[in-house]
Amino acid sequence: MQSFELNNIWEDILQEIKRSMPPSLYDRIAYSIYPIELQNNEIHIGCMQSFIKNLIESQPAVSQPLHNAIKKVTKSPKQLILRNINEEIGIDTPIIEAPPMPLPSQEEPYQEEFYTPIYQDPVVIERKLPSTEQNVVIDSNMTEEPVHISDEPMVIPKKIKQQTKSINTLQPKDVPIDLSASNLNPSYRFDNYITGNANRIPFSAAQYVSEHPGGQNYNPLFIYGPSGLGKTHLMHAIGNAINEKQPNLKVMSITSEKFVTLFVESIQKGQGELFRNTFRNIDVLMIDDIQYLENKQGTKTEFFNTFNELYNNGKQIVLTSDTMPDDMDQFEERIRSRFQAGFVATMEHPDLETRIAILKSLIERENKDEHIIDIENDAINYMALQFDENIRKLQGAFRTLIASASKETMPINLEFTRKTLANLIKHEHVTYINIETIQDVVSTYFNIKKQDLLGKKRKAQFAFPRQIAMYLCRDVVNESYPQIAQAFSRDHTTILHAYDKISKEIDKNQELKQQILEIKEKLNSNKKHDH
């Protein structure tokens, strides 16, 4: 199943769960799991903490609403396969287990538990009175004897209050923080961020942080990935979501270069206190490309102190980088260890499926802005195949194409696309996968004529390869059912039947599974030829 289709199904499943689960329990579960794969009779769910996996497996109050929602949305019961993502991707950062979670029982309504802390040490309060009189305060609930408040320090012998940790703020709370340096881009949002296998874990972690800023397991959130994969988009989406849901929180989003500039200017102008006042009294600090600070010794020290101040006060920190913490040789170990103290989310290069989805979302966005764009599937697949390094280059190619197009060239076809983007492509993939390519490869693989593959003969030696070809047109190049039907001179319901049949048979028939893999290898070998 295509990743964007799976995400849409998952959103519907979450909405169903939300209706039947207490809010606090839903919040804990929903932002710690995400879909990996939906097969015929199985749904694979990734768990971002081991205790969440254990909780779902052991508690019917959690697993039953999940099963019911999956069954309702997918129209059939599915076997639930829970996978511990931290083990699969080899994260060696210790995962902090959560305390037991109160669950609703059937006998009594669900109610959140509130805990009254007990403190063993007395609280010492130093207080000077303007008068020399001694005042007596009697509290029958807390003390057995009167407590005298005088010039001397007062000791309360009962376990009644926690010695609160003072927060070192540099300015009164009623004075606004200067957030003018924050560069949040309002167009970077979760709802226009395309997810796939390469970025689903960072996306889930970012969503959790936006709902629970300052949460222990995801603070700091360190988003790693090569340039142009969408790290900045994801970081800004966090800030925009927090501003919408919790507008009282002060969010600072800034590049590392800007952070350095402000710090240097504060030293030159003798405004160091003002700089610290700005960055140590915010609620969310997000810094893009943190690796830029490696060679900035003075700024690194200031950042370290700012990081500690915010972290110790439970403030959220989000960092992006194209270098992993362990590879930041110019950072001291104390800083690198803090980067790894929360959650390190890795972004990979987007696969072909995700790149096609990104292009289609760009087309949809243009159409919403009343810039009607009509691009043939062959042209979309061609672009997605050629620009596989990062999302930024793919988006640049798309803008170049639509800027060069005119009403006379609509719809934009493959020939126009190749000609327009020729200067941007260093090594063109001459042969790429489309419907015709699949028809040719399948015909050759089963040693039948292409005209028999496309014909009306119902003998198994022709019908079975025909169904495989229809399946691959949907599975590999994501062509629409009507488009595939036209290419095979069939009704689209025939294509639906073929896709469903082969999808089910793959799980049962190892020989068919091997055949599909071999055909895909031949298709991949075709698309890798450079020119």
Image: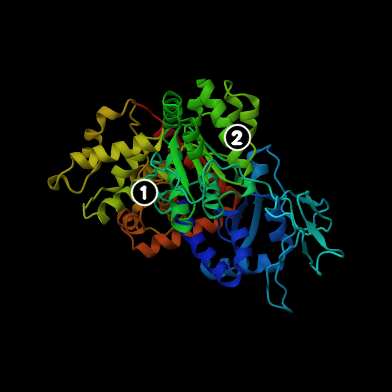
Asked if residue 401 shows in the view, the reply is: yes
Where, by quadrant of the figure, is residue 137 drawn?
Answer: bottom right
Colour scheme of the picture:
rainbow
In the picture, residue 156 is in which quadrant?
bottom right
Q: Looking at the rendering, in which quadrant would you find the C terminus? A: top left
Question: Which residue is nearer to you in this view: 183 or 480?
Answer: 183
Is mark 1 in CB contact (under 8 Å) with mark 2?
no
- Amino acid carrying label 2: it is Phe
Residue denoted by label 1 = 186
In the depicted structure, whether residue 285 falls above or below residue 272: below
Q: How many marks?
A: 2
- Which element carries disc 1, helix, strand or loop? loop
Mark 2: secondary structure:
helix
Mark 1 or mark 2, earlier in chain: 1
Direction front: furthest residue: 132
Residue carrying label 2:
339
Q: Residue furthest right?
A: 144
Instruction: Name the residue located 44 percent from the left edge and 33 percent from the top edge.
Output: 525
Amino acid, disc 1: Pro
- Examine the image and state in which quarter residue 523 appears: top left
